[in-house]
Amino acid sequence: MHVLVTGGAGYIGSHTVLLLLEEGHTVSVLDNFSNSSPESIRRVEKISGQSVATYKLDLLDRERLIDLFGQLRPDAVIHFAGLKAVGESVAEPLRYYRNNVAGTLNLLDGMMSTNCKKLVFSSSATVYGDSNKLPLSETTERSATNPYGRTKLHIEEMLEELGISDPDWSIANLRYFNPVGAHESGLIGEDPQGIPNNLMPYVAQVAIGKREQVNVFGADYATSDGTGVRDYIHVLDLAAGHLAALEYLSIQRGVNAWNLGTGHGTSVLEVIEAFSRVSGQEVAYQVVERRPGDVAECYANPEKAMLDLGWKAERGLEQMVEDMWRWQVKNPDGFLN
């Protein structure tokens, strides 16, 4: 199958591109490199021993996008491209709506121009808002507490309505939780721009000495150690989930949603302790006030993905941390090395 991957040079995108190649698919990558580096694709090519057709293009450039679809005529699309920082979305909501929602509309126009109607969409557990009905299942009521989350929710609703209007579409909305880890080679991994927004890369940068300490936002939650609990999933398990969804879409029509998570929560202190143990470095931290909007716990019920897709997360916290640390040590400055 010829698969076009938008945002394919990004963290999750690059690992999925690699797995697609290893499974024998033809892959084209579309990326504007605003939050990624062409070096990630070069490293994917090094690991796989295969070349990847890569196009620098912004989804907001509708005319060029439609031209590219006419040239490539892919069988399916995996759509990762989008802005993703919650705090930034609050400060720049219109930029997020324009980039994420309007960009997806242009992508759908491109797909329809060549009758390409198989789409795997990179959604997020943020579509569940601040629900405390745990574990979160696909039937949990959706809401959103910030512009980033609302763009994901709007796109999901848009895709659902598209599927109702045209039953020839096959669409997967993949709601995943907290991607972490890296490829076991240490050649590709998460390369945050500036100060990391997520816990695991921040802890890794403290462990390697790039940052002084981790701020733990609240230690008085009703959890095992008082710190927030989240569902961390290895990026390679996540990539496998996208392939499983793609295989499902090849034989089934309609619009479906699946959680991609482990079904288990890990606290902030457990992550810090695991990093200290694996790296052999003390990870300094201080407890500070809670952040507005943070919930005590958030983790998935992944049973539907197992039943429908035959997929489940295979890698535990120890491997997530080991692979993340290997990537950090080999690439202390990310892809700038």
Image (cartoon, rainbow, N blue to C red):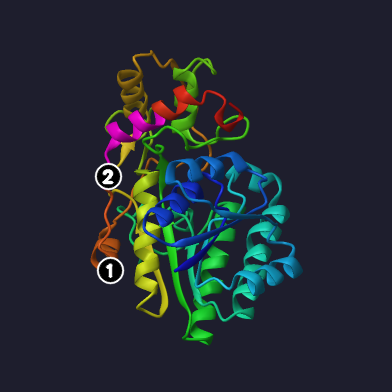
Disc 2: CA contacts within 10 A as few (<14), some (14-19) or many (>=20) = some
Q: For numbered disc 1, what is the local secondary structure? A: helix
The x, y position of residue 295, in whole percent, is: 42, 43
Q: Which residue is mark 2?
A: 264
* Vertical side of 113 occupied by 123: above or below: above
Q: Which mark is residue 308?
A: 1
Q: Which residues are magenta?
A: 314-324
Mark pair 2, 1: CA separation:
20 Å
Q: Is residue 105 visible?
A: no
SS assignment for the magenta stretch, majority: helix
Q: Which sits in the foreground, 317 or 138?
A: 317
Tell me which label, 2 or 1, sits earlier in the chain: 2
Q: Give the amino acid at mark 1.
A: Asp
Nearest to the observer: residue 218 or residue 168: 168
The disc at residue 228 is none
Name the residue located 36 percent from the left edge and 78 percent from the top edge: 252
Mark 2 vs mark 1: in front: 1
Q: Amino acid at mark 2?
A: His
Decide: is 17 above or below 305: above
Secondary structure at numbered mark 2: loop
Which residue is found at the position 71% from the left and 48% from the top?
92
Quadrant for the N terminus in the image: bottom left
Residue 75 at least partly seen: yes
Left or right of 154 on screen, residue 284: left
Residue located at (65% from left, 71% from top): 71
User: Residue 315: where, in percent of width, then height?
Assistant: 27, 42
Instruction: Tell whether 242 sits left or right of 65.
Output: left
318 inside magenta stretch: yes
